[in-house]
Image (cartoon, helix red, strand yellow):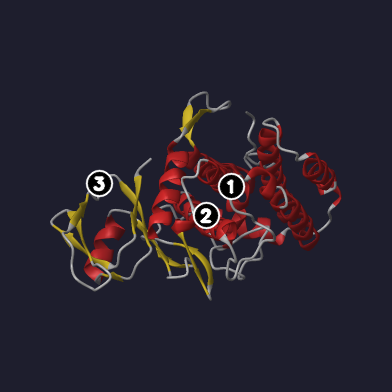
Amino acid sequence: MKDTYYLFNPGRLERQDNTLRFVPKDEQGRELPPKFIPVEGLETLFVFGSLDANSALYTFLGKKRVSVHFFDYYEHYSGSFQPKEYLLAGKMQVEQTRAYLDPARRLHLARGFVEGASANMLRNLKYYSGRGRDLAAQMAAIEQYREGLADVRDVPALMGLEGNVRQTYYSAFDHILNEFELGGRMKQPPGNEVNALISFGNMVCYSQALDAIYHTQLNPTISFLHEPGARRYSLALDLAEVFKPILVDRTIFTVVNKRELQAKHFDNTTNGCLLNNAGKQIFLKALEERLKETIQHRTLNKKVSYKYLIRLECYKLTKYILGMEPAYKPFKIWW
């Protein structure tokens, strides 16, 4: 897998020969010494500051198949530059649309995303329960919700059940975290440090899912759990549901409980609580390490990274949609 690079400062990004040259600016707008980013081996750029660039740069990035994801000042995902699709397949597009239009197949896929997400949330709670945290009530409630998954008959009801699972799961955070409190989930704007971490991490996870979809024949706009059209790349939202507990939440538990993130890494303003640049760098470093971590895959019988697991999930979706597999089985932590 290729690398991800994060740009926190505002600045100018340009092509220089066959590599990238980034000239950052300080808070007073003065140019700082340039940094060179080797384009070979680069897969994704995450941009958190304002960026000066021209069409020649994006043409170059497109040829090198480098995606660029943009976030605004309030850490909201703004949009992406995606290189020209190189795996377009008409048959895949037709079959993905048919799967969405078939109520039974759409519900099967949507149920799979909720099943995978809830199983991975439950696994997180069991992990911390084994380390002395009192999470019995939350685990029992989520188990009960999961038993009801098979009886759900439409996607809106499934979304409601997923909401109940997630609300119960979030109520366990204050038993797991040694520092800070979540209280209730607040998104726009996040009202405290833990809400800020969840919102920021979820958007990065969404972008990772979008990148994984780009390298397959799937169309990111045709989704099954989230309604297409509510968000532009709604299939990335579906996929991210499965991986948020594994990637984002576990990273939050680690950086908070190890006190790698402290109050000084957040800015509390009238627009909510946000990570500052130092805080973003600490969190993203921990998340990047998590993405590069490998596991021994039971089916493939080889080591794969957490990042590549998202791509494998896309391949599983593809096989089900094309009729090569009778069912979609979501990824669940087995260790």
Q: Earlier in the sequence, mark 2 or mark 1?
A: 2
Can you identify the residue that label 2 sits on? 201
Q: Quadrant of the C terminus?
A: top right
Q: Residue at x 54, y 68 (%)?
A: 232
Residue positioned most to the left: 17
Q: Residue at x 50, y 38 (%)?
A: 306
> Does dot 2 land on a helix, a strand or a loop?
helix
Decide which of 174, 165 is in the foreground and name it.
174
Residue 241, above or below 184? above
Q: Are marks 2 and 1 in contact (CB under 8 Å)?
A: yes
- The picture places residue 192, in percent across and down from the top left corner, at 58, 62
Residue positioned most to the top: 301
Residue positioned most to the bottom: 270
Res. 329 in view:
no
- The picture places residue 167, in percent across and down from the top left corner, at 74, 56
Q: Earlier in the sequence, mark 1 or mark 3?
A: 3
Residue 10, above or below 182? below
- The picture places residue 176, in percent across and down from the top left corner, at 65, 43
Residue 37, above or below 270? above
Q: CA distance from mark 2 to mark 1?
A: 8 Å
**On residue 249, which mark appears?**
1
Question: Which of the 4 image quadrants contains residue 124?
Answer: top right
Can you identify the residue that label 3 sits on? 40
Q: Earlier in the sequence, mark 3 or mark 2?
A: 3
Query: Is 280 on the left or on the right of 316, as rendered?
Result: left
Identify which amino acid the numbered label 2 is placed on.
Answer: Gly
Identify which amino acid the numbered label 3 is placed on.
Answer: Glu
- At label 1, counting other C-alpha atoms closer than 10 Å, the crowd grade (few under 14, some 14-19, many 20 or more) is many
- The picture places residue 327, in percent across and down from the top left corner, at 70, 41
Query: Is 241 on the left or on the right of 137, as rendered?
Result: left
